[in-house]
Amino acid sequence: MKADIVEVRLSDGRQVVFLEMSSAPTDFLNTHTVGDMYKTVQERIDSLNSVLLNFLNYDVRYAKKLRSLIIQGIRDRLTLRTIFLKGKKDYADEEELSVVFLLSWEFRFQFLEVFELMENVIQYILEYPNIVKELMKHLAKSSEFSEFSIRHCISCVTDQI
């Protein structure tokens, strides 16, 4: 599975941000778009899991700020969505910000909203090292068997969202 664009962090080669553009402005409910949505959820879970593999013995309650991001374009709307692990096989998908990006003369007024969306992405990437430092302060008790250890919580199943 591949997104239209994948942003990769150079320090460790992890996939950080996905960009998926789906269909023309009139075909947003066709099978291709629905398939793209399912595909991107699975890609984000896989990406998040690849990051979480570095922290298997840490407490999942402190890992909620570790997220996989996607900017999804459907019709004239760009939406920033994140996915994170809440507990055992319990992934949460959240819409962070959504903006209309009209391809018309009026689109020039939408640039501020688009820049705000990009600011959210950049801010997350810049905060990532601090998020990891905070997580590493919280080793799960009896790490391998703790119900709160990330090892105990990750899954590859998309039905849990």
Image (tube, rainbow, N blue to C red):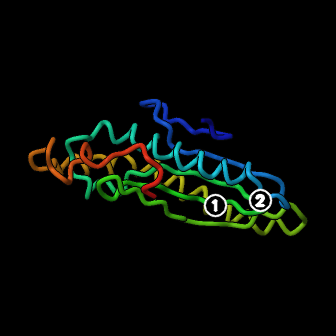
Task: Give the residue at x 43% y 52%.
Answer: 67
Looking at the image, residue 66 sits to the left or right of residue 57; the answer is right
Q: SS class of the residue under badge 1?
A: strand
Image spot of residue 41 (x, y percent): 54, 50
- Mark 1 or mark 2, which is nearer to you? 2
Tell me which amino acid carries mark 2: Phe
Specify few, some or many for label 2: CA neighbours under 10 Å numbering under 14, 14-19, or 20 or more. Answer: some
Q: How far across and down, in percent of the image, does residue 72 sit?
A: 65, 54
| Image coords of residue 29 (percent x, y) | 75, 60
Q: Estimate the x, y position of residue 47 in percent, counting from the top left.
A: 46, 40
The crowd level at tag 1 (other Cα within 10 Å; few <14, some 14-19, many 20+) is: some
Q: Quick one: 30 or 2, which is closer to the camera? A: 30
Q: Nearer the viewer, residue 53 or 137?
A: 53
Q: CA distance from mark 1 to mark 2?
A: 14 Å
Residue 114: name its quadrant: bottom right
Lateral position of residue 31 relative to residue 136, left or right: right
Q: Which image quadrant for residue 6? A: top right
Q: Which mark is residue 29?
A: none
Horizontal placement of 139 versus 153: left or right? left
Residue at the spot of label 2: 28
Q: Earlier in the sequence, mark 1 or mark 2?
A: 2
Instruction: Please identify the quadrant where the N terminus is shown.
Output: top right
- What residue sits right under mark 1 in the picture? 79
Residue type, mark 1 in image: Thr
- Residue at 42% x, 56% y is 160
Residue found farthest to the left: 142
Farthest-out residue, right: 105
Residue 37 against residue 108 in the figure, above or below = above
